[in-house]
Amino acid sequence: MFMISGTDPLPNLPRRLKELRQELGWTLEDVAERVGVTQRGVASNWEATNQRRRIPPITTLLALQRWYGVSMDYLLGHPDAERDSPAVKRARKNLREQLRSMTELEKIAPSNRARRVLTVAMELSPEVFFLERVAAYLFLETVDLVELMASGLWTEALVERLAAILGLKSEWFYSLEPVEEASRAE
C-alpha cells in the first residue's frame, strides 16, 4: 500500500469503495474479512479522503472487484466506466439464454422459480454467482441462503434482490412472460 500525496491519481476510488460496501450493507470489518485483511482499520483507510488514505494492493482490488461484480474501471472511479464486469455480463446473458429454454419454469410458483433460477445461475457461472456473494447481496448469511434454497420460502423483497443480482426483472418471477434483462438504474 502507498499513501497518496500531491496529485491524486484515483480521486473517485474512496467514494466508489464506500458506495459499493454500503450497497451491500457491509461494515468495514465485513470487507476486510472477505478480502483477507487482518489489521484493524486498514479497510477504513481505503475509503479515507484525508492523509490516512491508502490505495489497496492490486490483489485486494481484484478481490473487491469479484465480490462487487463491477468492472475494474468502475471500481477505480472512472466516471464513464460500465458498472458490471465482463464476467457478470456474460453470466447474466448465459443465464437468460438458459432460462428461455426452460419451459417448466412457467408452471411453478415464484418461490420455487427463484430457487430454481438461482440454482441454474450458480451451476452456469459459479465464478460470478458463488454462494457467499449471492448471500451477501440478499443480506443473508451463507447458511441462511442454503436453508432458503432448501425451503423455498422466498419473500417478495428477496425475489427483488435476487432479480437484481441476476440481472432479471423481478416481475418475471410472477408472470408467464419471457425472461428479459432488467434495466439498471445507475
Image: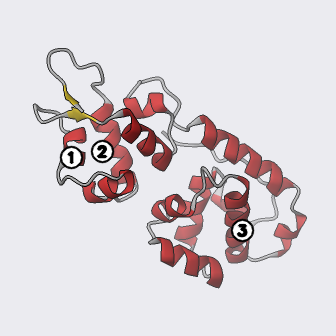
Residue 103 appears in the figure: yes
**Element type where label 1 sits in the image:** helix
**Mark pair 1, 3: CA separation:** 44 Å
Whether residue 152 appears in this view of the structure is no
- The residue closer to the viewer here, 146 or 156, is 146
Crowdedness of circle 3 by 10 Å Cα count: few (<14), some, many (20+)?
Answer: some
Badge number at residue 18? 2
**Quarter the N terminus occupies:** top left
Q: Is residue 149 above or below residue 174?
A: below
The amino acid sitting under disc 1 is Val
Q: Residue at x 35, y 38 (%)?
A: 16
Which x, y percent locates residue 76? Answer: 38, 30
| Circle 2 crowding by C-alpha within 10 Å: few under 14, some 14–19, many from 20 | some
Residue drawn at x 68%, y 47% is 92
The amino acid sitting under disc 3 is Tyr
Q: Nearer the viewer, residue 182 or 90?
A: 90
Question: In this image, 112 relative to 63: left or right?
Answer: right
Which circle marks residue 42 in the picture? 1
Name the residue beneath numbered marker 3.
174
Q: Residue at x 38, y 46 (%)?
A: 20
Compute the Cα span from label 1 to label 2: 13 Å
Within the image, what quadrant is residue 54 found in?
Answer: top left
Query: Does the CB distance between marks 1 and 3 fall below 8 Å?
Result: no
Q: Are marks 2 and 3 in contact (CB under 8 Å)?
A: no
Alpha carbons under labels 2 and 3: distance apart: 34 Å
The residue sitting at the left extreme is 51
2 or 3: tag closer to the N-terminus: 2
Residue drawn at (52%, 42%) of the image = 185
Secondary structure found at label 3:
helix
Identify the amino acid type marked 2. Answer: Lys
Q: Nearer the viewer, mark 1 or mark 3?
A: 1
